[in-house]
Amino acid sequence: MVRPLISATKAGLELETDKLEAHYLAGGNVSDVTNALISADKANMELSFQRATAIDLAGRNVLEAVKVSVNPKVIETPKVAAVANDGIQIIAMARVTVRANIDRLVGGAGEETILARVGEGIVSTIGSSQSHKMVLENPDNISKTVLSKGLDSGTAFEILSIDIADVDVGKNIGAQLQIDQAEADKQIAQAKAEERRAMAVAMEQEMKAKLVEAEAGVPQAIADAFRQGNLGVRDYYDLRNVQADTQMRESLAVDGVRHDVEERRYE
């Protein structure tokens, strides 16, 4: 209590001891508040004791806030990846120069909000570009567009400038998406072809089963024809001769094919 009060008196500030004691008992940092008031007075900044103590009790470093308000600092965004309309990925990094806004320190958003908004603005600006070449040729368009959106609204900072520090060309996202789509279409076509093949095989098996079932009924039909007198013995033997002749022709055809294959192999 004594040293901050002496420092304030030597700097020409009149602080009430009762108020300093009340701030100390409330859990505040009397030394930081006093030094912040001295710094603000020397920089011709308007900062009342009540506002300084409120900022300190809100959990913010009031002395650091005064320093940033007098001497703006630069915060750097992480690398932000976005895709232009031609499908080419652009990776950008920006440096944001900010100054603390004393009036909005209590209840205002912090640096994380500034970085998130700037990153969102970079993505939106690059995404609305017709070509990645336009972004590479005029990277300052990104900073101008982002800066004009009033991204510091509701934050504890005032954005002074946004400078694009680095711009790199990334992957061809558009081509990769087309490749993935073509691969997906190929797999769908293969699945449909396999489905049609399976249906054809099932139909073939069904027809074979019907054929076997029909052939199984031939002896019974022949027997019924004998009993009803619709088929004579001579007709039966003629039928058997036709069947034997057909089997012999099929056997000769198979043997001929095998012989041709063997000759071709020998040649």
Image: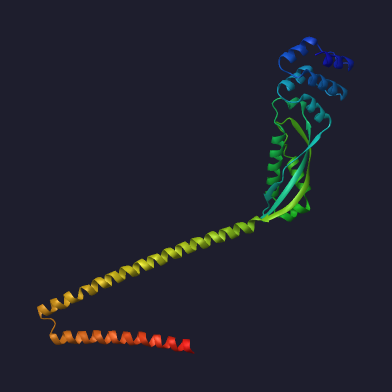
Looking at the image, which residue is at 72% across and 20% down? 57
Q: How is the image coloured?
A: rainbow
List x then y, in percent, for residue 51. 76, 20
| Relative side of 83 to 41, left or right | left
Please state the horizontal and vertical placement of residue 19, each as a whole percent of the image.
77, 12
Q: What residue do we see at 76% from left, 53% from top?
A: 136
Label count reads: 0
Q: Is residue 46 visible?
A: no
* Above or below, comparing residue 47 to residue 198 in the picture: above
Of all residues, the one furthest to the top in this rendering is 18
Q: Nearer the viewer, residue 148 or 93?
A: 93
Does residue 210 lie above or below 134 as drawn?
below
Q: Position of residue 181 (x, y in %)?
A: 56, 58
Judge left or right: residue 129 versus residue 239.
Answer: right
- The quarter of the rendered structure image containing the N terminus is top right
3, 111: nearer the viewer: 3
Left or right: residue 14 versus residue 251 is right
Give above or below for 99 relative to 52. Answer: below
